[in-house]
Image: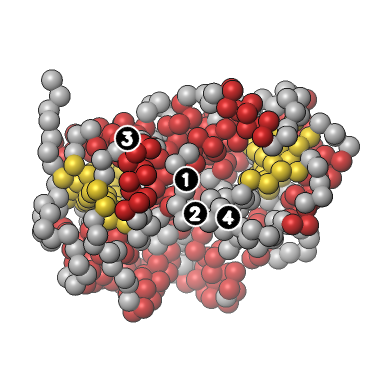
Amino acid sequence: MEKTHTQHILILITNPFAMLNVVHSGLMRELGRTYRVSVMSNLLSEADVAHLNAHFQLHMRLLKCPIPRISRYLKWLRAFQAALFAHFFRLETFRIKLAERHRILAWLFRMTGNSPALRACSGWLLIWLRHRLINRTSRSRARLPGAHCFAAVISTSPLDLRENRIVNALKTRGTRCIAMIISWDNLTSKGIINAAPDLVLVWNKLMADEYEQLYSLFGNVGALRMTGVPRFGIYAKPPDPLKVAVFRGKLGIVPRACVILFSTGAVKHHVCQDYVIEDLLEYARTRPEVVIMVRCHPGDEPGKYERFSGYKNLRFLPSFRQCKEDIPPSDFLETLQIQLAASQVCIQIASTMLLDAAACDKPVISIAYDAHPQVPYRASVRRFYDYAHYQPLRLLLKENIVHDRTALFAKLDALAENGWQAPKWQSVLKTVMNLSTPEPARTTAQCIQEWLDA
């Protein structure tokens, strides 16, 4: 007989992407079977929580304590810390981002990184600064849920200093901390975790090794568990063919049509992606069976693609923010799966859609060229594929990346001739998502329960 728990868990949600991983994935429901669950969030209202509880059959409670603000001083201190972190570990992601704004500083960053003495100095400063930030945030004056006795606090965005502030303050009261790393690039691109989590949940062994390498500098790294990706659990079961047919029908896509899904990337990284749509329209010009679906990134401007309104073989799928919503709708993951199932191939630019498509056994092509060949590297999409989290997969992803429009057309033709079958290398990519378990949300909840019971 299963042991009954009455322990109280606090979950911090400050990021829409984290909502998908915790609420939409079913993890919150799994935790609710065993624990009392409360949420602190700057995204959710009482009405949102009531809707989510009804839709996902949850019993979570929203605490009225606001997420604490971070002073400008602490923000600057953390930015300096992120630079030290990248310098000591020679993280290419930071150098590339730095070169976008300051080429000379990027050059100095790279050159000083070759000096063992300077890197040792960075390491010493990094240890001291992290210790200072943890101590300072532990004495937070922000209003915290002190009247509650939590068995654990789960930080769903542990690289957010606001969540670190809550975690550190609660740890001084004896609350245990669990950190969830929610994406494959977070450890090398989002700075540093300014808290000392007792349990760290990662996707796979690659991320576990990465965490140990980066955080062993600070002493005890805590317990590590590899759980897979909770939000990817939806891909274990194929989508309902009827729902896919209805979706295509609503967009006026006939059954025999060949659908190319282009998922736009973050606008703050790549301002104009219209040229990809133009190239796909050119590809479709002599192929009347091709329909292009553009899945808009949440940061896209609503009227950005109005000039394409006259094309009959082009469909736009607005993001939830274009629909005036601040949080992902309840059916976000199901809709994404249906969009992929309704397509023959997915086109993307260095985004997590690479993983979503691979999880769905959908052919995926990564764009690594710009609208104009003369675009310098520091502003080119080519730089995204040199980020640190891509390095372990560099050879594997060479099969997936196209560097000009001609290569894109050739890749599409080759996939079409092969019946739009996913390339064999994509099965290797699934190891990044750790899809060995069909229910990663349940696996994650079990890891948390076993650790708390130990």
Disc 1 secondary structure class? loop
* Mark with earlier residue (3, 2): 3
Q: Which percent across, then down, holds residue 201? A: 31, 43
Position of 186 compared to 303: left or right?
Answer: left
Task: Check disc 1 and give the amino acid type.
Answer: Pro
In the depicted view, which residue is nearer to us: 107 or 245?
245
Residue under label 3: 57
Residue under label 1: 329
Disc 4 secondary structure class? loop
* Mark with earlier residue (1, 4): 4
CA distance for labels 3 and 2: 21 Å
**On screen, residue 368 above or below 426:** below
Displayed quadrant of residue 422: top right
The image's mark for residue 325 is 2
CA distance for labels 2 and 1: 8 Å
CA distance for labels 4 and 3: 27 Å
